[in-house]
Amino acid sequence: MKHIETYNFTNKRAIVRVDFNVPLNAQFEVTDDTRIRAAIPTLKKVLNDGGSLIIMSHLGRPTAAENKFSLKHIIPTIEKHLGVQLLFAPDCMGVEAAELSKNLRAGQALLLENLRYYAEEEGKPRGLPQDISDEEKKVAKALMKEKQAAFTSRLASYSDCYINDAFGTAHRAHASTALIAKHFPDDKMFGYLMEGEVKALEQVLQNPKRPLVSILGGAKISSKIGVVEHLLDKVDKMIIGGGMVFTFVKAQGGSIGASLCEDDQLDLARTIMAKAQEKGVQLCLFDDVVVADAFAPDANAQICPVTKIPDGWMGMDAGPQTLQTWEKVLMEAKTVLWNGPAGVFEMPAFAKGTHKIAEILAQITAQNDCFTLVGGGDSVAAVSQMGFADKVSYVSTGGGAMLEYLEGVELPGIKAIKQS
C-alpha cells in the first residue's frame, strides 16, 4: 500500500474511484456538491504532480444507460472546483474511453460515464426470469463473475496506478472499489478523503482517548443491532436517542403512548441493557421527553417523564432534564462518536435535542481536547444545517459504509487497498 502524500504521479495516469453520486434537480443541475468538493484535494494532487486523471463513479441506480443518470450532467460542477476542462468518455467500456485514457497528457483529466450502466460493476446479473431454476441461477452468476473480471481488467488497463477515494461505497465489493485494486499491487492507495475517514474511525474504535462516548439515534433499533453490540465492547458510555429509545423504555415497563416502538425487539433491548451492565457500560436513555399529540410540526406539545407518556401522545425529542444529563456525560468525554439525531430534527419544534448535541460537541472539541466524529446521513445533515460541521473534529461522508465499519465489518474497499 502506498500513500498519496508521498507518491509521485509525474507522467502517470491515475484512475480514481470517487463517489460523485450527487443529487440533481429537474434541469440536471447539481443541488449539493459536497461529495465533489470532498474529492478535489485528491484529484488536484495528481494534476499538481504532473500526472493525469481518469475519474470514475456511479450515479443513482440505473439498470441500463439512461440520460438522467449520466455523469455528463455534473461536468460543469467538477470543472468549476477542479479548475481544468474535462474530457468525457460516453461509455466507460468503449473504444473512446480506451483511446482517451491512452493519449492523456500531464495535467489532463478524463471522466468516464456511469459505471453502473454495466451490471458488471456490481457483479449481479440483471433481468433474470422469475421462474429460473437454481442451476440456471448458478450458471448466470458464474458467467457474471467472468464478465466482471473482464470489466475490471478493462478499467485497470486505462491507468498506471489506482486511488480509492470513495468511502461511501467502501462497503461494496464492486469492480471499481475492491476488485480493481488487485491489478495494482504496488501502485494502489487511499485518496485524502478515504485516508481521513479510515484514520478518524480507527482513532475512535482502535485507540481512543477515554472516556469514549457513543451517541446513537435514529428510528429503529433493528437497523443498528450490529452497531450497538459491537460498540458495547468499545465504549465507556452509550447515549441512546431518537425513536429507538422507546423500545428500551417499553422493555423496562414504561408507558410510551403512541411513540414509535418495535415490539418484536423488546427482548433484544433487554439483552442489550443486561450486556451493558455486565460490561460496565453506562447506558443513558431519556429522563424526560418532548411529546406531541400528532406527528406534525404544529402539533400540541408538552414535556413529561419518558416512562409516563399519555395515551395518544408520541415522543418527538429529548426533554430538558435529559439534555442536562447528556451534557454532564459529554463534558467528561475525550472521544465522542455521534450517529443519529436525538429527535425529529426536521421539524423545528422538535430539533432542540439534536441542536444541543451539536452545540456540546462543538464546545468540547474546542475546549476539552475531545475528538468528535459525526457520521450517518441525518447526523451529518443536522450538523451542516445547524452550522457546526466545521466545529467538530471529523464529519464522515459514508452512511452505510460507516455503519458497517462500526459493526466491526472489514470493508472490501479498505481491505483491497491494505492487503499486499
Image (cartoon, rainbow, N blue to C red):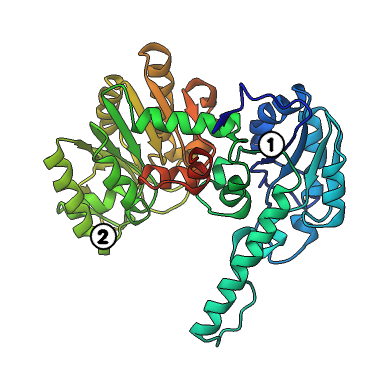
Identify the mark nearer the N-term, 2 or 1.
1
Q: Are marks 2 and 1 in contact (CB under 8 Å)?
A: no
Q: What residue type is labelled 1?
A: Ile
Residue at 23% in and 31% down: 236
Res 86 seen here: yes
Residue 412 image point, x, y percent: 49, 48
Disc 2: which residue: 265
Q: In this view, does 322 lie above or below 159?
A: above
Mark on residue 36? 1
- Between residues 191 and 289, which one lies in front from this camera angle? 191
Residue 263 image point, x, y percent: 26, 63
- Between residues 416 and 384, which one lies in front from this camera angle? 416
Q: Is residue 386 left or right of residue 243?
A: right
- Under tag 2, what secondary structure? helix
Q: Which residue lies furthest to the top in this view?
A: 367
Q: Tell me how far mark 2 sits from mark 1, CA to CA.
A: 39 Å
